[in-house]
Image: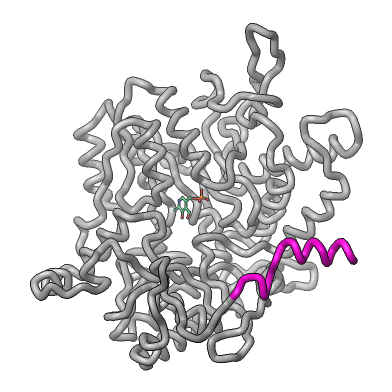
Amino acid sequence: MTKMNALPNLPDGTDLLEHIKEDFLGFDTMYKLATGETTRRRYMDSTASTLMMGIANRAAQNFLQHYANTHSEMHFSARIATDSYHWVHERILKFVQADPDEYTCFFTGSGVTAGMNRIARTLKNFRSERDIVLVSIMEHHSNDLPHRKHGGKVIHIPVDTHESQMGCIDMDLLEKYLIEHRGRVNYVSVTGISNVTGIINPINKVAKLAHKYDAFIVVDAAQLAAHVPIIMSGNEDSEMDIDALLFSGHKTYTPGSPGVVIARKSFLSGIEPVEVGGGMVDRVFPEEYFVKDQFPDREEAGTPNILGAITLGAAIHILDRIGMDNVLEEDQMLTNLALREMINMNEVVIYGETNTRTCPRAGTISFNIKEMNHGLVAAVLNDYFNIAVRNECFCAHPYVEKMLQMTHAKQIEKAKADNVISWHDEPWMGMVRVSFGIYNSMEDVKFFAEALREIILKKDKFESEYFINSKGDYEHKEFKFTSDEYFCLSSTAEREILG
Ligand SMILES: Cc1ncc(COP(=O)(O)O)c(C=O)c1O
């Protein structure tokens, strides 16, 4: 497949993306299905976590030959580890186009969640007189609850006011709130891509609007980083620059890596870091201690997740070598193909605006099959087709509920009147989410669409083959799966002992 911006990524002219597409750990994992066949798993749950990029993993394995703690300084390995670890910070700043003079990058926790708690506390400290934080209703709980707990009073920007753009952030309302609470809004925090609908938010436009009313802009890039090019600073109009941005390494082809925060140094330099301990101090006395001025050290107390960060640095470098424009183009080809296939199925309900010209999406689609529980659909996709998807509410309860209510308003009303209990009568119940990564192909999408068609056709048959178990999950009546059949850590360790 020739891409518009195809780069001769490899010396022989091969497209790097095509070259690495199948080079992911777990790409070829085989499972036995309810049909008795053993087939390759098709991983379509990348919005939760992506698979490990093979080359990045191998680069990091090489690093392990030199592994040492970055807090040691004099021996050879410590110098290699420290230099490599620092390189990763610089590489990430470049990846998100953040000016290293103004911004710092540091690692915390295992995803966006820990960093968002840090940023909420930091910005509250920075402008304690400001008591309001604006977030959209489409946020993951990790970009909502930290602000409620540490940032101030959270006001949610609705997504149900633009009927023609269902599920998109309402910029007019955002401006209305900024005017209404002028002088009180400390910052606006929005997601770059919804983890429910895949809708891409215009983050640089949101930044311009926030700045116009003297509010800062924080971007939850948990979904954005692996799908869309990011320009934090150096925009033609500097009001479009982003003040802080966070992403999760485990959603960026590096399971086991840390969460990443990129923020203006000016937010952090005047105040004591939220976390204290070894590595972030110049001198410690029994009565007092002196925090380093130097970034990112002062923000990273304790021994960091060195191996995870190194692997992430390699993955980020590879994504940039492919070109994030190319990654986005490929991603939208998959997402748009899936949308087209699903729109043509009368029995499928897709949540959020589906016109991708007015409302672009990347990577994620949530849906339901009419009159079928989302848990059952996810179970059948897994047990019969070896397609891994997620279902329920995706840690975004208010948004999922809002989308279900908007989409099924009539059915909900009727079901309530008829006293019928089913998934659309209980709007908080959930959806099925299919999501793509760079290892997915057009063939995967077609396979998925075929699977949906078959499920719709044999709805009653599948329904009759499952029961709801004591955990409330759909379980096959005959087909049984046990994890130990495929992986047991103690026996794997034992096998390794024996060689
Ligand atoms: C949009 C969004 N924000 C935040 C998070 C939280 O990320 P993590 O679990 O890596 O902390 C997620 C995870 O799914 C997400 O999709």
Render colour scheme: one colour
As for residue 112 lying within the magenta part, the answer is: no
Main SS, magenta region, reads helix
Q: Determine whether 111 is above or below 275 in the image.
A: below
Query: What's the residue at 52%, 18% (across, down)?
Result: 270
In which quadrant is the C terminus drawn? bottom right
Outermost residue, front side: 470
Q: Residue furthest left?
A: 417
Front-most of residues 400 and 217:
400
Q: Residue at x 32, y 35 (%)?
A: 133
Residue placed most toward the observer, 461 or 70? 461
Name the residue: 47% across, 28% down: 122
Residue 199 placement: quadrant: bottom left
Looking at the image, how many numbered discs can be counted on the residues? 0
**Residue 29 falls left or right of residue 468:** right
Q: Is residue 499 left or right of residue 154?
A: right
Q: Which residues are magenta?
A: 482-499
Query: Quadrant of residue 491 in the image?
Result: bottom right
Quadrant where the N terminus sits is bottom right
Is residue 185 shown left or right of residue 2? left
Q: Is residue 445 at least partly visible in the picture?
A: yes
Q: Position of residue 43 (x, y in %)?
A: 56, 72
Regarding residue 365, the answer to whether it shows in the image is no
Q: Nearer the viewer, residue 234 or 34?
A: 34
Q: Residue at x 53, y 87 (%)?
A: 34
Where is residue 464? Give x, y as percent.
37, 88
**Where residue 206 sits: x, y (%)?**
36, 45
496 relative to 113, above or below: below
The percent position of residue 447, horizontal first and vertical second, equals: 51, 85
Does residue 494 belong to the magenta stretch? yes
